[in-house]
Amino acid sequence: MRQCNDLSGLENFMARWAMTIDLRKCIGCSSCVEVCNQVNNVPHESAWRWLIDRTSIDDGKINRLFLTMNCMHCNNPPCLKVCPTKATYQTREGIVDIDQKLCVGCSACVLACPYQARSINHISRMNCYEKDHDPSNRTRIEDRIGICRKCNFCLPLIKLGVKNGLKPGQEPGATPMCVRHCPGEALTFGDIDDPTSSISHIISKNKTFRILEELGTNPAVYYIPDVEE
């Protein structure tokens, strides 16, 4: 497994990042999708996050399910195994990302991902990550045309936040943008290996499931089901 070479901001920091999505709280507003698209300048046809909206009828009762999806940051990622240039890598903290300098856009990882979380970038765009609480002061990252891109849990933001002494999942400056902007507080992020973290408490107190867990991917995104549905 290729490990990330650029660990600036995370040198002496060990964690295992994970996310929970509470389906009891999700109202299907797509705020997480929109903020991700805006911050990362992602075209809608290549969304790094997307919303699945399903309606069913059971004994005359109408049930509606909202399910948000993104890269699952698998502990055993199929995408990493098939990348011919080793552009796909996994950080020590479990985040799966792509080295733009090594990606050749072959789409092998796109086909290997069972979550359809990867896409090839066909437009020139600039990603911007907040450098601090001043919106006028940001770090901008350019994406090359023809390479693969996807959700990376806002890794540059996390690295910068940790470097500045912030705690991911608790302080906005080190927390993924989708989590920060969820109006229903359905998303939680943090260190799953820290028993005192909010995400550890949430997982221990609630029934959870992970999508396609039977494939052995060991996803880092946990869903809390609506028990009634």
Image (spheres, grey):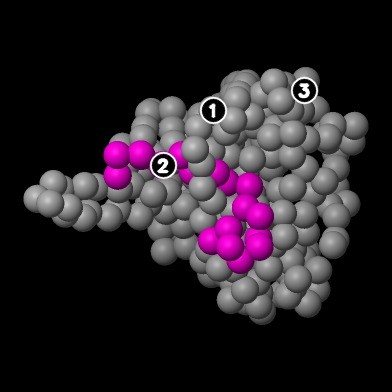
Q: Nearer the viewer, mark 3 or mark 1?
A: 1
In the structure shown, which secondary structural element does the residue marked by tag 3 occupy?
Answer: loop
Q: Nearer the viewer, residue 118 or 184?
A: 184
Q: Nearer the viewer, residue 128 or 167?
A: 167
**75 sits to left or right of 61:** right
**Looking at the picture, which amino acid does disc 1 mark?**
Lys
**Looking at the picture, which amino acid does disc 3 mark?**
Asn
Q: Nearer the viewer, mark 3 or mark 2?
A: 2
At 57% from the left edge and 55% from the top edge, which residue is drawn? 71
- Residue receiving disc 3: 164
Report if residue 227 lies within the magenta region. yes
Give the Cα separation between the discs numbered 3 and 2: 35 Å
Picture coordinates of residue 128 (x, y %)? 60, 42
Report if residue 33 lies within the magenta region. no
Crowdedness near tag 3: few (<14), some (14–19) or many (≥20) residues, C-alpha within 10 Å: few
Above or below, 97 relative to 129: below
At 63% from the left edge and 47% from the top edge, which residue is drawn? 220
Marks 3 and 1, the one that precedes in the sequence: 3
Give the Cα separation between the discs numbered 2 and 1: 13 Å
Marks 3 and 2, the one that precedes in the sequence: 3
Give the Cα separation between the discs numbered 3 and 1: 31 Å
Picture coordinates of residue 83 (x, y %)? 74, 73
**146 sits to left or right of 185:** right
The answer to whether the residues at label 3 and label 1 have Cβ atoms under 8 Å apart is no
Q: Please give the range of residues in magenta.
A: 212-229
Marks 2 and 1, the one that precedes in the sequence: 1
Farthest-out residue, front: 59
Q: What kind of secondary structure does the magenta stretch mostly adopt?
A: loop
- Residue receiving disc 1: 205
- Residue receiving disc 2: 225
